[in-house]
Image (cartoon, grey):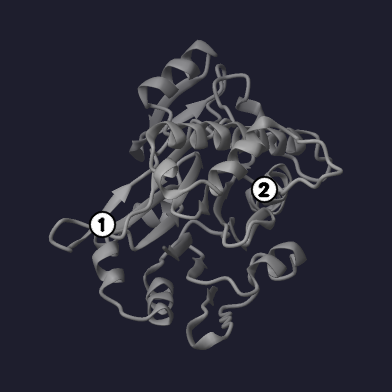
Amino acid sequence: MGICCSREGGGRELEETEGWFPWKHDDFLQEQLAGAAGVSMHTKQGWKGVNQDAMAACQDFAGHKGQIFCGVFDGHGPLGRDVARHVRDSLPKKLSASLAPSTEDDAPSSNSNADVDSFDKSDCTSSSDASDENQLLSSWKSLIVKAFEDVDEELRQHSGIDCLCSGTTAVTVVRQGDHLIIANLGDSRAVLCTRDSKGRPVSVQITTDLKPDLPGEAERILICKGRIFAMDDEPDVPRLWLPDQDAPGLAMARAFGDFCLKNHGLICTPEVYYRKLSEKDDFLVLATDGVTRVDFFPDFPSSFMSISTFQSRSNFLQLRTVSAGTIATEI
C-alpha cells in the first residue's frame, strides 16, 4: 500500500494501492494530511508474516503553520499491530496538545512550550547561535520524553490491548522551519540524504539503532537482571530476555509496551536529536529495520535523488520498499 501527497500542479494527490491504508479512517490524521507537501509513504508485508507497521504525517502540526510531524512505528509481538496503531494515533495528539499555541485565557502549560514558540519566531542571527539551538533541543526533549512516557503509561492501563509481550518502536521527526527534531525509540532509523562538497549524494544516519548490546543499554539491562544473547539461527541479532526465562527475546533495548521487560532494563525514553537544515540537504527517510537491513538501502539516497519529480520518487519508494514502513519527506 502507498500514499503520495504533493502540491505539484497546485493540487492534492492521493494514491492508494494494495488495499486498506493503515490510518485511512483516522479523521485526525486524515485532516492533518490534507494539503501536505513533499511526503511519500509506503508499507509492504515482509516475509515474516503480518505487517504490523503504522505511519503518520501531520501538516501544520500543533496549529503551527508549516510545522510537520512524521512518524514510523514498527509493532512486534502477538498484538504488535494494535500497539503500533494506538501509538500512531495517540502520540501525535499528546505532543500536539503540549505544543498548541496558548491563548490569553490559558495559563502557559510549561516554560518549554514558551521556549519552543519563541525560538520559532527568532531572527536568523539568534537561531543560528549554538546556545539557542541547545535551548531548542532541551525544550523539545522535555516535551517529547513526557509525551512518550504518557503514551506508554496509557498502554499499560489500556484494557483492550494486552501489551505484556507486545510493543512497538517509534522514530519521529518534527520539522520547524529549518530545524529537525528527531526522536527514536528502538531500532527504526532516521537517515538524512544530503550532498557533499562536490554535490554528490550522501546519507547521514541521524539516529542510533538502540540494540540491547550497545554499551549504555547493556549496562542498564544487566543492572536490572535482564539477559542479553543472540539465538543460534540469528547470531548477529542480540536480544533482551527475562532473568529466568528464554523469552520474549526482544531485539531492541527501548520500546513502547513489552511490560514484561520494563522491570528488566527495557525503557520507553526516546533519544532526541537535533539537526539544522542546510541548502545541501534534500530529504529525510524514516524507516523500520525491515527496510534498513536490505541490500539496496546503502544505495537508496543516490538512486532516490537522481529522480527529478516527487511523484516519480514516490513510485520509486513503493517499488524498492520490500518490508515494513518508510516515510520519505522532502526538505
Q: How crowded is mark 2: few (under 14 residues within 10 Å), some or many (20 or more)?
A: many
Which quadrant is the C terminus positioned in?
bottom left
- The residue located at (82%, 45%) in the rendering is 104
Q: Which of marks 1 and 2 is nearer the N terminus?
A: 2
Front-most of residues 16 and 104:
104
Q: Amino acid under label 2?
A: Val
Q: Please rate how many residues cluster around mark 1, counting C-alpha atoms within 10 Å: few if below 14, some from 14 to 19, many from 20.
A: few
137 vs 62: above or below: above
Q: Distance between the residues labelled 1 and 2?
A: 29 Å
**Which residue is tagged 2?**
87
Q: Which of 106 and 250 is in front in this view?
A: 106
Going by the picture, which residue comes out furthest to the bottom?
9
Front residue of 192 and 323: 192
* Label 1: which secondary element: helix
Q: Where is residue 47 in the image (x, y as percent from the top left)?
A: 45, 61
Q: In this view, does 63 lie above or below 79?
A: below
Amino acid carrying mark 1 in the image: Pro
- Left or right of 284? Residue 90 is right
The numbered disc on residue 89 is: none
Give residue 231's position: percent from left, percent from top. 40, 34
The residue pinned by badge 1 equals 298
What percent of the width, then of the height, locates residue 69? 57, 55
Depth check, front residue: 314 or 236: 314
Q: Where is residue 179 drawn, in percent x and y? A: 45, 49
**Residue at point 51% right, 78% down?**
6
Query: Dividing the picture into quarters, in which one does residue 261 lie?
Result: top right
74 lies left or right of 218 = right
Kindly identify the residue that appears in the image at 41 percent across and 66 percent down.
Answer: 322
Location of residue 21 with respect to 148 vertically, above or below: below
